[in-house]
């Protein structure tokens, strides 16, 4: 009876630009256009990249270009630093530490990221960074751990952020409640909850005072966070910890967006009212109005 030998799945072949933009560190990839040939010499290609630029000028996806001549690439592994700069603002940079080797085809090859700066990972919304404040670096470590599939590490970092910044998060929710016209009793409940050390007690103190605009799918976001944090790390596989970590991040991100939007909407409304009032105050009186005043 003939036996069937299982075939190994083919590795996905990517462009060098895709590899640099989206591949995490420590993952070897097959690249279709890794090298370019000049005579008998093969050098690393320098594709333009579409990356997020965090400068005040850009604050969005921009084209980044390589800043130097590439080194030669051979059939053996070699190491290289590749530096890119934003073509728009010409200030923000991205640097990759790579291990590369030429493949059998003229342009193909293998590539491995040893590291990159700024670190690999999806953009963290600015409102999340504002909400967690002093624990920004801890949150970003958790995000990097999550990106690399390290569930236990990601969960531990996110739990530390929420526990450390519980009072700050509740305080921001209280600001929204105040802007939306909450009564004194509700605002005092938020003030007490900010100082409360027990998470469950703090949640109970403000459960009826949280504005509806801050509820996530109709649920108290603090309860959702506490439920995930209460799961713990003991005897749980890394995959489950990764799912919990992702849930914590998503809830925290959504809450930050809701808080930021509520405060932004209120600020924009106040600016609009102020502009209209100032416009009316500076508006010249009609000519007939002045005549009426003189007649009186």
Image (spheres, grey):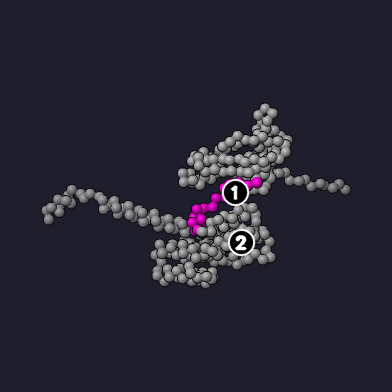
Residue that badge 2 annotates: 156
Q: Position of residue 38 (x, y in %)?
A: 65, 29
- Crowding at dot 1, Cα within 10 Å, few <14 / some 14-19 / many 20+, comes out as some
202 w.r.t. 60: above or below: below
> Can you tell which mark lies on residue 199?
none
Q: Nearer the viewer, residue 68 or 59?
A: 68
**Do the residues under discs 2 and 1 have CB atoms within 8 angstroms?**
no
Which residue of the protein is positioned furthest toward the left in this rendering?
Answer: 295
Picture coordinates of residue 22 (x, y %)? 61, 46
Seen in the picture, residue 153 relative to 103 is either above or below; the reply is below
Q: Residue 13: tell me if it is visible.
A: no
Is residue 26 among what the camera can see? Answer: yes
Task: Using the numbered discs, state the Cα–Cα distance from disc 2 to disc 1 in whole angstroms.
Answer: 19 Å
| Quadrant in the rendering for residue 104 | top right
**Viewed as shown, does residue 137 lie left or right of 278?**
right
Magenta segment range?
Answer: 114-133
Q: Residue at x 77, y 45 (%)?
A: 7
Among the two numbered marks 2 and 1 on one chain, the one whose residue lies closer to the N terminus: 1
Helix, strand or loop at label 2? It is: helix
Residue 237: percent from left, percent from top: 68, 61
Among all residues in the image, which is located at the extreme top?
A: 39
Q: Residue furthest right?
A: 1
Q: In which quadrant will I find the C terminus?
A: bottom left
Return the mark for residue 120: 1
- Determine the image quadrant of residue 191: bottom left
Q: What residue is shown at x 67% (from left), y 44% (from top)?
A: 112
Q: Residue at horizontal 58%, vertical 36%?
A: 68
* Residue name at image x 49 percent, y 63 percent: 168
């Amino acid at each position: 009876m003939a036996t069937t030998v299982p075939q190994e799945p083919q590795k996905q072949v990517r462009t060098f630009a895709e590899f640099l933009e989206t591949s995490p560190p420590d993952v070897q990839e097959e690249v279709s256009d890794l090298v370019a040939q000049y005579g008998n010499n093969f050098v690393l290609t320098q594709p333009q990249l579409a990356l997020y630029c965090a400068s005040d000028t850009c604050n969005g996806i921009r084209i980044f270009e390589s800043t130097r001549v590439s080194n030669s690439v051979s059939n053996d592994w070699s190491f290289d630093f590749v530096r890119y700069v934003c073509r728009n603002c010409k200030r923000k940079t991205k640097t990759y530490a790579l291990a590369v080797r030429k493949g059998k085809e003229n342009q193909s090859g293998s590539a491995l990221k040893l590291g990159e700066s700024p670190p690999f990972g999806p953009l963290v919304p600015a409102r999340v960074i504002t909400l967690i404040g002093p624990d920004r670096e801890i949150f970003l470590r958790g995000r990097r751990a999550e990106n690399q599939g390290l569930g236990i590490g990601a969960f531990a970092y996110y739990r530390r952020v929420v526990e450390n910044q519980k009072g700050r998060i509740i305080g921001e929710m209280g600001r929204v409640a105040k802007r939306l016209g909450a009564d004194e009793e509700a605002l005092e409940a938020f003030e007490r909850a900010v100082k409360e050390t027990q998470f469950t007690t703090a949640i109970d103190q403000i459960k009826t005072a949280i504005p509806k605009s801050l509820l996530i799918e109709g649920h108290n976001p603090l309860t959702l966070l506490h439920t995930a944090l209460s799961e713990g790390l003991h005897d749980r596989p890394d995959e489950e910890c990764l799912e919990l970590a992702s849930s914590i991040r998503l809830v925290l991100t959504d809450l930050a967006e809701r808080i930021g939007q509520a405060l932004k909407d209120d600020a924009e409304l106040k600016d609009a009212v102020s502009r209209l009032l100032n416009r009316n105050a500076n508006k010249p009186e009609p000519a007939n109005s002045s005549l009426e005043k003189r007649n009186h």
